[in-house]
Image (tube, helix red, strand yellow):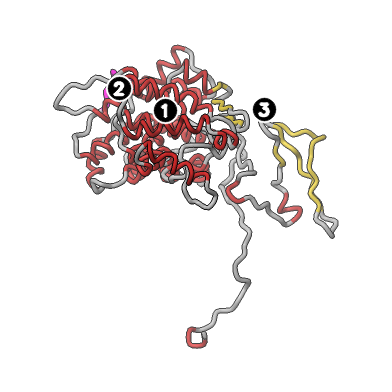
Amino acid sequence: MSASGKDSVTIAVNGSNRSLTAPVLHGTLGPSVVDIRKLYADLGMFTYDPGYGGTAAVESKITYIDGDEGVLLYRGYPIEQLAEKSTFLETAYLLLNGELPNASEREAFENGVIRHTMLHEQIRQFFNGFRRDAHPMAVMCGVVGALSAFYHDSLDINDPDSRRISAFRLIAKVPTIAAWTHKYNVGQPFMYPRNDLGYAENFLYMFHAVPAEPYTVNPILARAMDLILILHADHEQNASTSTVRLAGSTGANPFACIAAGIASLWGPAHGGANEAVLKMLSEIGSVSNIPDFIRKVKDKNSNVRLMGFGHRVYKNYDPRAKIMQKTCHEVLSELGIKDDPLLELAMELEKIALNDPYFVERKLYPNVDFYSGIILKAMGFSTSMFTALFAVARTIGWISQWEEMSRDPEQRIGRPRQLYTGSQRRDFVPVAERS
């Protein structure tokens, strides 16, 4: 970040001689920002920005998005290149450390993650406190938050080594927690992680295998899962990432911060979007009902929404969706799925959205949630697990953002301000005297 003495914005209060000359700060990419930190001190005012859509609250070097052009960069690398040439753990190293690893660094990082995939055995008993039909995200929030009760030796957030160990533990253990959450829900025995399997392969093994028979992970499905993890690893200062940073700004331990991020991700407007896609398809019912559904979507007086299309940030085609579209068809072909009614519905909706002028003009292209929901369903995941899988992927992004925040000398406890519109000062009236 740099500030130029020539670039500034002057804010003047009408009818007074008060004004503020605010410097303009420039990043390496994207819009410049106006530094308003002295606004209250000089003018006695705050800015009003519901949802923080026009506010840069942090300086970050991790992820860059250009929504108008459909660009997503991790540490400067296009998501398309990482999806084609990298692996999830290599991408995780990049996000966490800022550079791609050399061969020895990559091996050491992968071994570090593999050595932490097991959970403390008492955590196995912790699951018994949940109802069998509890939503997976409820279990994930509880178990991840409880990790701080089992791993006391890495809670010093001011110690780089403690933060590094916590990062390894979270990246490694969250997939195990997610897989065990599923097993607990369906009443099957927990499967322990295997150090001879890759990251995505190990997760699929723990999720689908049972002790009664051998289970071999399909390499194409393992690569598809690895790709899903890469595409969802980070996405700038979204709601859950901002939650992690806000929690972290208080000095909370990393396990608590990631649990807070999982809770934020649970919302249907955020991590639950791909689950909402499958729910929408179920409600449509059959291909013959699509024309009536599309008519309702186009009707301004209707409350019917087309889930999985368009994106708050991307005003162009979501670059992740292009990659996911190809993977979707590869997975369906590998599994030989041709007659699934929901998948047939999804493919027909995709064709309409890519060709109907109504959707094309409004840039309502299928987004990553649309395709990921189809893939995950085809791979045998229940819709209630979709958001939990999102949390598995996003954990590395959260940890990377938390680590960056921890090293930021300008970091302060988060404290948004407000525009108060409630009652003015008034005096308490005893109950007998109230009308």
Which amino acid type is shown beneath numbered disc 1?
Answer: Leu
Check the picture and name the quadrant holding the N terminus.
Answer: top right
- Secondary structure of residue under mark 2: helix
**Most common secondary structure along the magenta stretch:** loop
2 vs 3, front mark:
2
Q: Is the Cβ of the residue at disc 2 closer than 8 Å to that at disc 1?
A: no
User: Where in the figure is residue 305, as x and y percent of width and height?
Assistant: 47, 45
Instruction: Write the residue at 25% across / 43% down.
Output: 127
> Is tag 2's residue or tag 3's residue first in the polypeptide sequence?
3
Q: Nearer the viewer, residue 211 or 308?
A: 308
User: Where in the figure is residue 6, as x and y percent of width and height?
Assistant: 82, 34
Q: Nearer the viewer, residue 336 or 236?
A: 336
In the image, taking residue 382 as reference, residue 156 lies left or right, namely: right
User: Where in the figure is residue 333, as x and y percent of width and height?
Assistant: 34, 20
> Is tag 2's residue or tag 1's residue first in the polypeptide sequence?
1
Q: CA distance from mark 2 to mark 3?
A: 44 Å
Find residue 171 and report its image quarter.
top left
- The disc placed on residue 360 is none
- The disc placed on residue 335 is 2
Which amino acid type is shown beneath numbered disc 2?
Answer: Leu
- The disc placed on residue 229 is 1
Residue 164 in the image: above or below residue 281: above
Tell whether position 370 is magenta: no
3 vs 1, front mark:
1
Residue 301 in the image: above or below residue 346: below
- Secondary structure of residue under mark 3: loop
